[in-house]
Amino acid sequence: MATQHKGAQNHTSAAEHHEHAAHHHREAAKHHESGAHEKAGHHAHMAHGHASHAKHHAEEASKHHAQEHGSKK
């Protein structure tokens, strides 16, 4: 497997965390519908964690882009 550029790695990681978050949201909905609210809460919490990690990776990708290509600020 080829080594990915640091900015690309962060974009890929953000996408993967968004996918994991979506999975946990679907699981939370399924458990909520069946009345398993503790399980629903667990999956909702996991979804939040993945969404937070996705945001972090997106911010890192943005910082890397600004450092590599110069910020217009």
Image (cartoon, rainbow, N blue to C red):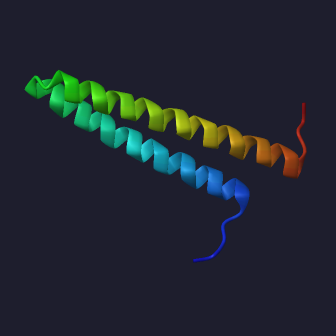
In the depicted structure, whether residue 42 falls above or below residue 71: above
Question: What residue occupies the far bottom of the structure in this picture?
Answer: 1
Residue visible at 87% across and 50% down? 69
Q: Is residue 24 left or right of residue 8?
A: left
Residue visible at 13% across and 26% down? 36
Q: Position of residue 51 (x, y in %)?
A: 48, 34
Q: Position of residue 32 (x, y in %)?
A: 17, 25
- Quarter of the C terminus within the rendering: top right
Comparing 43 with 66, the one in front is 43
- Quarter of the N terminus within the rendering: bottom right
Comparing 46 with 67, the one in front is 46
Q: Is residue 35 left or right of residue 60?
A: left
Total count of labels: 0
Comparing 39 with 57, the one in front is 39
Q: Is residue 6 left or right of residue 2?
A: right
In the depicted structure, whether residue 39 falls above or below residue 67: above
Q: Position of residue 64 (x, y in %)?
A: 78, 47
Q: Position of residue 5 (x, y in %)?
A: 71, 63
Report which quarter residue 29 is drawn in. top left
Question: What residue occupies the far left of the structure in this picture?
Answer: 34
Residue visible at 39% across and 34% down? 47
Residue visible at 40% across and 39% down? 21
